């Protein structure tokens, strides 16, 4: 039973690596630097959760070896915010044309994995909507 489980996991890993390699070749990061517009823009919030079993110096060294700060965010991707969340790690929100999602994903997969566990959340700017709702509520009083 254990051998079958190991074989299935190995097969899944090989398939995943093959698909990633094909996908990585299909995405040409430098080819698509379209500007984000209201019609095509998306925002993505990324949680970069620190591996707390390792000292910060090790994490920084691995990020440097993997070229994290040279690669992420890709050129032309706007950083909306980049914050430290104590006890968690870093929270980065970026804005870019939706057509560049795979490129942003690959930049993180290739350079952040190993130092961070990642979580991704599509986001949008709610501040103008909230401010308008507050103004309407105050005007109604």
Image (spheres, grey):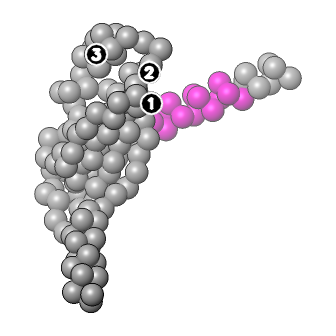
Report the Cα–Cα distance between label 1 and label 2: 7 Å
Query: Looking at the image, which residue sits at the far front?
Result: 141
Q: Which residue is mark 3?
A: 60
- Helix, strand or loop at mark 3: helix
* Label 1 CA crowd tier, 10 Å (few <14, some 14–19, many 20+): some
Q: Residue at x 73, y 23 (%)?
A: 7
Q: Residue at x 24, y 16 (%)?
A: 64
Residue 101 among those drawn in magenta: no
Q: Nearer the viewer, residue 60 or 130?
A: 130
Question: Mark 3 near mark 1, Cβ–Cβ under 8 Å?
Answer: no
**Magenta residues, start to end:** 8-21
Q: CA distance from mark 3 to mark 2?
A: 11 Å
Label 3 vs 2, first from the N-terminus = 2
SS at badge 1:
strand
Q: Quadrant of the N terminus?
A: top right
Q: Quadrant of residue 112?
A: top left
- Most extreme residue toward the bottom is 140
**Residue at the location (29% across, 19% down)?**
63
Percent position (x, y) of residue 52?
A: 44, 19
Q: Is residue 92 left or right of residue 22?
A: left
Of the two numbered discs 1 and 2 on the same chain, state the one appearing first in sequence.
2
Q: Position of residue 115 (x, y in %)?
A: 38, 21
The reply to whether residue 108 is in sight is: no
Q: Nearer the viewer, residue 64 or 83?
A: 83
Q: Find residue 107 and report its horizontal and vertical position in percent.
A: 30, 35
Mark 3–mark 1 distance (CA, rounded to whole Å): 14 Å
The residue at which mark 2 appears reads as: 51
| Disc 1 to disc 2: CB gap under 8 Å | yes
The answer to whether the residue labelled 3 contacts the one labelled 2, judged by CB atoms less than 8 Å apart, is no
Instruction: Indicate which disc residue 117 carries.
Output: 1
Taken as a whole, is the magenta stretch helix, strand or loop?
helix
List x then y, in percent, for residue 45.
33, 48
């Amino acid at each position: 039973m254990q051998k079958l489980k190991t074989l299935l996991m190995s097969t899944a890993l090989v398939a995943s690596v093959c698909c990633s390699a094909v996908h990585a070749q299909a995405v040409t990061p430098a080819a698509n630097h379209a500007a984000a517009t209201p019609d095509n823009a998306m925002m993505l919030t990324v949680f970069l959760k620190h591996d707390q079993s390792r000292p910060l110096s090790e994490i920084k060294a691995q990020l440097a070896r993997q070229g994290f700060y040279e690669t992420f965010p890709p050129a032309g991707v706007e950083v909306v915010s980049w914050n430290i969340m104590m006890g968690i790690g870093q929270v980065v929100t970026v804005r870019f044309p939706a057509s560049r999602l795979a490129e942003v994903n690959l930049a993180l997969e290739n350079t952040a994995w190993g130092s961070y566990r990642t979580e991704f959340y599509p986001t949008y700017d709610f501040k103008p909507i909230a401010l308008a709702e507050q103004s309407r509520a105050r005007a109604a009083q």
